[in-house]
Image (cartoon, grey):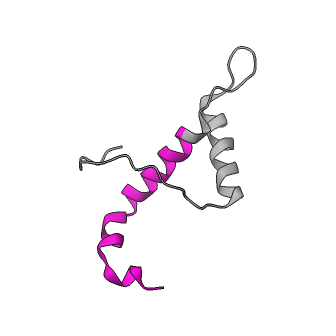
């Protein structure tokens, strides 16, 4: 990730739609391509983590959580 800020790994449960997860798996397969036997060697959990982390960094999650108004329901 291009961001030079210091980051931490936080294990969390993330709610997303089934369509989002399906898109991650399908696109990861397209990018990696099959191996010689026609199978795919993709760690889906790692790819989900990567995509969520990139989204949070690129969409300024830090500013979102600093805004007290975002804590009101």
**Where is residue 55 shown, x and y percent of the image?**
45, 56
Task: Check the image and name the residue furthest to the right.
Answer: 38
Magenta segment's dominant SS is: helix
> Image check: 24 left or right of 10?
right
**Where is residue 33 shown, x and y percent of the image?**
65, 28
- In the rendered image, residue 58 lying in the magenta stretch gets the answer yes
Relative to residue 44, is residue 40 depicted above or below? above
Residue 9 visible in the current orientation: yes
Relative to residue 56, is residue 28 depicted above or below? above
- In the rendered image, residue 70 lying in the magenta stretch gets the answer yes
Magenta part of the chain? 46-73
Give me the residue at 32% from left, 45% from top.
Answer: 2
Give me the residue at 31% from left, 65% from top.
Answer: 62
- Total numbered circles: 0
> Image check: 61 left or right of 4?
right
Relative to residue 35, is residue 20 depicted above or below? below
Q: Quadrant of residue 32?
A: top right
**Where is residue 8 shown, x and y percent of the image?**
32, 47
Give me the residue at 54% from left, 56% from top.
Answer: 13
Question: Where is the N terminus found, in terms of image quarters?
Answer: top left
Residue 60 visible in the current orientation: no
**Where is residue 65 shown, x and y percent of the image?**
34, 71
Give me the residue at 40% from left, 80% from top.
Answer: 71
Task: Check the image and name the residue furthest to the left.
Answer: 5
């Amino acid at each position: 990730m291009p961001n030079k800020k210091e980051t931490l790994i936080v294990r969390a449960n993330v709610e997303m739609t089934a369509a989002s997860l399906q898109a991650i798996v399908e696109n990861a397969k397209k990018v990696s391509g099959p191996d010689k036997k026609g199978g795919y060697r993709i760690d889906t959990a790692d790819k989900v983590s990567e995509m969520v982390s990139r989204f949070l960094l690129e969409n300024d999650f830090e500013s979102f959580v600093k805004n007290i108004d975002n804590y009101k329901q």
